[in-house]
């Protein structure tokens, strides 16, 4: 079956791509598009061409599965050049998304029309690449250097309306009328002369050398070690300084070099891994529960975040708190989050109002008698959590799913305290829960496949990436986190400062260093867990007391304006604190340690090795299904740099 078909309508050829699911630019699509160009140029009955796609989207990019294969002609740049060289006008008619190579194909066309809901983007940087089929050469000639750099370095798609404003789109069609609109638009262009090909147009806003260097420096700072955004910006800037042939050649050279790089391999690993986490063999074909109403126990930072995420996903939510004051505070946290989404244009006023109607609070567990799902998000104390589950079993339907958001505790023990334990699982969200994409789904010894499958379905509706974990202390993420934090504590006592370690890990590519992250999350959480584990701690294990001493002073991080750092007047940016420095010095002296210096490379290596070592134990014990799942936990939950592929990938542990 052909993936590209050609029909005609009164001197207009309709070239239609149908390569589900996203019309990717496979070898077959490229070949048949090239053949269509050749044949239509020779057909005297055709005066113009409309390029349109079947299915839910326009061409949404390259076929990534072909990246590891030997390239086959015709290559995409040749196909786009052939469209651009056509003797008859080609009009791209876009719905859904025109991404990557798909966007580049539209740039080879003479005109572009799109429905209002369409989006255009060049997201190659997310795969460690730059556009390789003329995108960095043609785009600045059409929309200018500044807008082009923004598109190719962020990879964020823009709407059809924005594309129309900046000149990428020539006309916007009413939704549902794209083909008829495109044909009418094309007919209006049939008698006009062909416009100058985009690649032959000048770049009119080329910055001087000083400004170019400043632009590249700014992109580099945001990239935090990732190469592709910087190379993408440089390619756009070069396209304004080189002649077009040299610009195409330079872009292609950059593309090929990046494609062979370890960073691109890592980012392709992440791309596929993120799509594999929810593919659990034993859950295939399992019918999931219909969940519409949800309860959340606890209105603190985490509970309010979970409630907000559920409301944003369209669920009805009841929040339970211990008294009216706490319920009101929880409701205010939820309202602040939803209002923030409204102010940023992420939801409409109509949706914000609907979410307000769908949300309620109560101090009585009896309000949950009809809910389909309840998530417990109270303090990390086993006794408290068991009390909550016993109350839930008294009032909820026998088939209602009960989930705990515990970060460390034994979910098997929690499930055992409930009637019908097959309906109990862990849903471990990450803070802030309405933003962070990761949810660890904790499989207990007694959970049913139906409950587990429903957990994955809920995560999908919440637009989260679910990762399956077995039961152990801290599950996947926090167990590894605890192990590498020990290494940080050891280095701290041996001579490094919190700033040394945080700076090293930011330079590694992390958004925040480990001590900065602890201050943001709250030091009291880890302190409570250390006290819980103290009775079973191996007396031969090295234990560093610095963090405990800081917590004993009531210093829990940003929320108390002091932790590992000072946060004067509620500032989010910490500054070194003499109190912490004094505690560190006292503990070193008590341990008889002569402090030494650490190189940045040594700090990074020690932390990575600690993560990989514990990750391997988790694999050996069957807590995680794959090294790729561990990588996704740390990329999505802890800010590990995507371009390194995750800790296991970076440490050389790959799934076979």
Image (tube, rainbow, N blue to C red):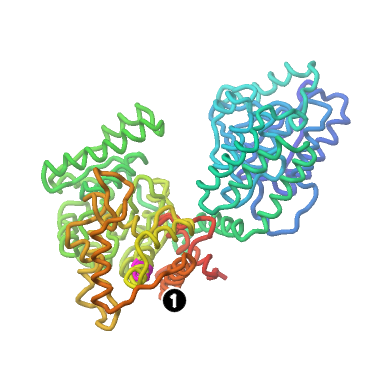
Q: Is residue 166 above or below residue 541?
A: above
Question: Which is more toward the observer, 144 or 358?
Answer: 144
Question: Which is more toward the observer, 285 or 485?
Answer: 485
214 left or right of 531 in image: right
Q: Residues within 10 Å of mark 1 (few under 14, many from 20)?
A: few
Residue 633 figure quarter: bottom left
**What residue is at 55 percent from the left and 53 percent from the top?**
226
Residue 447 figure quarter: bottom left
Question: Which is more toward the observer, 235 or 502?
Answer: 502
Q: Is residue 185 magenta?
A: no
Mark 1 lies on residue: 620
Q: Is residue 387 above or below residue 613?
A: above
Q: Is residue 354 above or below residue 245?
A: above
- The residue furthest bottom is 540
Q: Position of residue 286 (x, y in %)?
A: 43, 57
Q: Main secondary structure of the magenta part?
A: helix
Q: Position of residue 167 (x, y in %)?
A: 63, 25
Q: Is residue 486 magenta?
A: yes
Q: What segment is highlighted magenta in the picture? A: 482-487
585 left or right of 30 in image: left
Q: Position of residue 508 (x, y in %)?
A: 48, 59
Residue 471 visible at all: no
488 left or right of 380 in image: right
**What residue is at 21 percent from the left and 42 percent from the top?**
330
Question: Which is more toward the observer, 42 or 631?
Answer: 631
Q: Position of residue 1 (x, y in %)?
A: 74, 46
Could you say whether the residue bearing mark 1 is in a helix, strand or loop?
helix
Q: Is residue 154 above or below residue 273?
A: above
Residue 263 figure quarter: bottom right
> How many numbered dots are placed on residues in this image?
1
């Amino acid at each position: 079956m052909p993936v590209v078909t050609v029909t005609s309508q009164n001197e207009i050829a309709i070239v239609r791509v149908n390569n589900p699911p996203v019309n990717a630019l496979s070898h077959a699509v490229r070949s048949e598009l090239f053949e269509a160009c050749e044949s239509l140029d020779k057909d005297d009955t055709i005066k113009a061409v409309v390029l349109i796609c079947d299915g839910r989207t326009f061409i949404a990019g390259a076929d990534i599965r072909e990246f590891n294969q030997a390239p086959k002609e015709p290559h995409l740049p040749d196909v786009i050049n052939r469209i651009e060289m056509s003797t008859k006008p080609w009009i791209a008619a876009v719905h859904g998304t025109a991404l990557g190579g798909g966007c580049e194909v539209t740039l080879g066309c003479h005109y572009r029309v799109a429905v209002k809901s369409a989006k255009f983007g060049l997201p190659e940087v997310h795969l460690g690449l730059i556009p390789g089929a003329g995108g960095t050469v043609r785009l600045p000639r059409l929309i200018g250097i500044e807008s082009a750099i923004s598109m190719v370095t962020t990879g964020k798609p823009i709407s059809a309306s924005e594309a129309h404003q900046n000149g990428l789109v020539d006309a916007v069609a009413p939704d549902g009328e794209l083909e008829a609109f495109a044909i009418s638009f094309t007919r209006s262009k049939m008698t006009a002369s062909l416009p100058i090909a985009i690649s032959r147009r000048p770049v009119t806003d080329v910055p001087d050398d000083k400004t170019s260097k400043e632009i590249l420096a700014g992109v580099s700072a945001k990239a935090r070690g990732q190469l592709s955004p910087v190379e993408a910006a440089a390619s756009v800037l070069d396209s304004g300084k080189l002649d077009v042939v040299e610009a195409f050649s330079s872009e292609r050279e950059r593309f090929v070099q990046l494609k062979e790089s370890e960073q691109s391999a890592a980012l392709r690993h992440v791309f596929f891994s993120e799509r594999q986490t929810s593919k659990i063999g034993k859950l295939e074909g399992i019918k999931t529960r219909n969940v519409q109403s949800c309860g959340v126990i606890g209105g603190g930072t985490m509970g309010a975040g979970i409630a907000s995420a559920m409301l944003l996903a369209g669920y009805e939510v009841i929040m339970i708190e211990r008294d009216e004051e706490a319920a009101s505070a929880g409701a205010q946290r939820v309202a602040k989050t939803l209002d923030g989404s409204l102010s940023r244009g992420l939801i409409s006023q109509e949706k914000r109002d609907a979410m307000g109607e769908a949300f309620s609070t109560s101090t009585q567990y009896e309000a949950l008698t009809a809910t389909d799902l309840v998530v417990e998000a109270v303090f990390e104390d086993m006794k408290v959590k068991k009390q909550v589950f016993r109350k839930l079993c008294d009032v909820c339907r026998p088939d209602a799913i009960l989930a705990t958001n515990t970060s460390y505790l034994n979910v098997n023990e929690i499930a055992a305290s409930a009637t019908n334990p097959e309906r109990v699982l862990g849903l471990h969200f990450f803070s802030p829960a309405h933003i962070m994409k990761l949810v660890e789904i904790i499989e207990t010894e007694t959970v049913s496949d139906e409950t587990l499958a429903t957990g994955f379905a809920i995560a999908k509706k919440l637009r989260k990436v679910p990762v399956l974990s077995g039961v152990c202390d801290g599950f996947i993420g926090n167990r590894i986190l605890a192990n590498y934090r020990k290494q940080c504590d050891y280095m701290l006592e041996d001579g490094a400062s919190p700033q040394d370690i945080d700076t090293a890990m930011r330079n590694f590519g992390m958004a925040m260093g480990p001590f900065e992250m602890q201050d943001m999350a709250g030091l009291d959480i880890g302190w409570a867990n250390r006290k819980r584990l103290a009775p079973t701690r191996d007396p031969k294990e090295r234990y560093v007391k610095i963090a405990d001493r800081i917590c004993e002073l009531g210093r829990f991080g940003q929320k108390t304006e002091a932790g590992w750092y000072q946060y004067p007047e509620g500032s989010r940016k910490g500054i070194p604190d003499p109190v912490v420095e004094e505690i560190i010095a006292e503990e070193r002296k008590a341990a008889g340690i002569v402090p030494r210096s650490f190189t940045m490379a040594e700090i990074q290596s020690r932390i990575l090795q600690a993560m990989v070592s514990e990750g391997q134990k988790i694999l050996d014990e069957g807590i995680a299904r794959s090294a790729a799942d561990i990588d996704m936990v740390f990329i999505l939950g802890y800010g590990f740099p995507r371009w390194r592929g995750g800790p296991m990938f970076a440490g050389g542990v790959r799934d076979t």
